[in-house]
Image: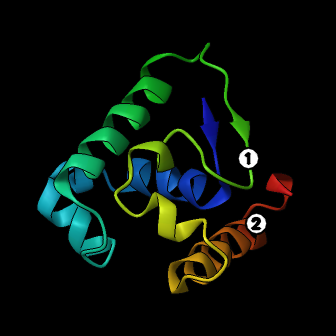
Amino acid sequence: MELRPHHVLGYLGYIKNPKANHFAEFRKVKGYFHSDKLVKHWIKTIKALHENPNLKFKYVPGIDTVCKKCEHSRECHDPNHRYYKIVKDADQYAIKWMPELK
C-alpha cells in the first residue's frame, strides 16, 4: 500500500475522531471535496491498515492507493490545475507535523 503524507495525516485524524466514519460528517470535515464513493474507499483503506498490523505501506510523493480511486486524481496531479497546489500544500503541512515523512 502506498500513502502520500496528507493521507497519513488524515488517517491519524480519523483514528482520533472515529465518529468521522459517518460519510456525511467525514465529507463535512474534508470540505465537501470528496464523493461518498471515495470516502468509502478511504475508510476501507484505513480499516485495512488498522486491522492488519503486518500490512506494509510506504510514503510516496504522488498518486497513492487512495488517489487511485479519487474522482479528482487527474486534476490533483496536473501542475497546471489549481488542485495540484492544494494537494502539494496539504503534503507540506503533513510533513511539517510529521518530519519523518520527508
Q: Is residue 47 above or below residue 62?
A: above
Task: From the viewer's perspective, tell me whether residue 48 is left or right of residue 28.
Answer: right
Q: Residue at x 64, y 36 (%)?
A: 2
Crowding around mark 2 (Cα neighbors within 10 Å: few <14, some 14 to 19, many 20+) is some
Percent of width and height locating residue 76: 53, 68
Q: Residue at x 73, y 74 (%)?
A: 92
Task: From the viewer's perspective, tell me whether residue 92 is left or right of residue 30.
Answer: right
Badge 2 amino acid: Ile
Q: Secondary structure at mark 1?
A: loop
Please state which of residues 25 and 36 is positioned toward the viewer in this rendering.
36
Q: Residue at x 34, y 58 (%)?
A: 71
Percent of width and height locating residue 64: 59, 44
Q: Residue at x 33, y 56 (%)?
A: 17
Task: From the viewer's perspective, tell me whether residue 15 is left or right of residue 22.
Answer: right
Q: Which mark is residue 60?
A: 1
Crowding around mark 1 (Cα neighbors within 10 Å: few <14, some 14 to 19, many 20+) is some
Quarter location, residue 9: bottom right
On the rendered image, what quadrant is the N terminus found in?
top right
Give the labeled residue for mark 2.
Answer: 95
Q: Secondary structure at mark 2?
A: helix
Q: Is residue 57 above or below residue 59?
A: above
Badge 1 amino acid: Val
